[in-house]
Amino acid sequence: MNSKELAQYIEATNSITKPWLLVQLRLKKLQERRAMLADDVYTKELEDIHLDLMKLGEWWRGIEDKVF
């Protein structure tokens, strides 16, 4: 699945409020641009995505049935 297909899936399933899918989209877009980026730029962007992922924490605790 490429970033366009993933974005279409997110849109079609009304999943814009699911932050883990947005992180996946960012990762996919970064992966697709990898060949065009310098190593330091790629690493910085990957670190930024990782930081955002870690900020999600365990927000889903207690509402698993609603969000998964």
Image (cartoon, grey):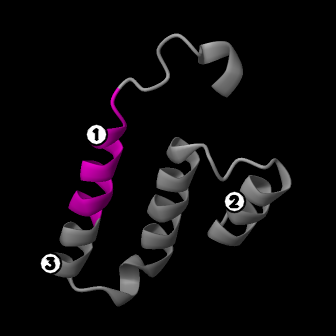
Task: Verify whether residue 47 appears in magenta.
Answer: yes
**Residue 6, label in figure:** 2
**Residue 54, label in figure:** 1
Please report the residue visible at 65 percent of the width from the left and 27 percent of the height from the top.
Answer: 67
Q: Nearer the viewer, residue 42 or 25?
A: 25
Q: Is residue 36 above or below residue 65?
A: below
Within the image, what quadrant is residue 44 found in?
bottom left
In the picture as drawn, the residue positioned furthest to the top comes out as 62
- Disc 2 residue type? Leu
Q: Is residue 49 above or below residue 63?
A: below
Q: Is residue 14 above or below residue 54?
A: below
Horizontal arrangement in the rendering, residue 54 relative to residue 63 (left or right)? left
Quarter of the C terminus within the rendering: top right
Q: Which residues are magenta?
A: 46-57
Q: Nearer the viewer, residue 47 or 66?
A: 66
Can residue 4 be seen here?
Answer: yes
- Whole-angstrom CA distance, mark 3 to mark 1, is 21 Å
Where is residue 34? Give x, y as percent.
38, 77
State which tag comes first along the sequence, 2 or 1: 2
Q: Nearer the viewer, mark 2 or mark 1?
A: 1
Q: Is residue 4 above or below residue 65?
A: below
Please report the residue visible at 68 percent of the width from the left and 14 percent of the height from the top.
Answer: 65
Where is residue 10? Give x, y as percent.
72, 54
**Residue 40, label in figure:** 3
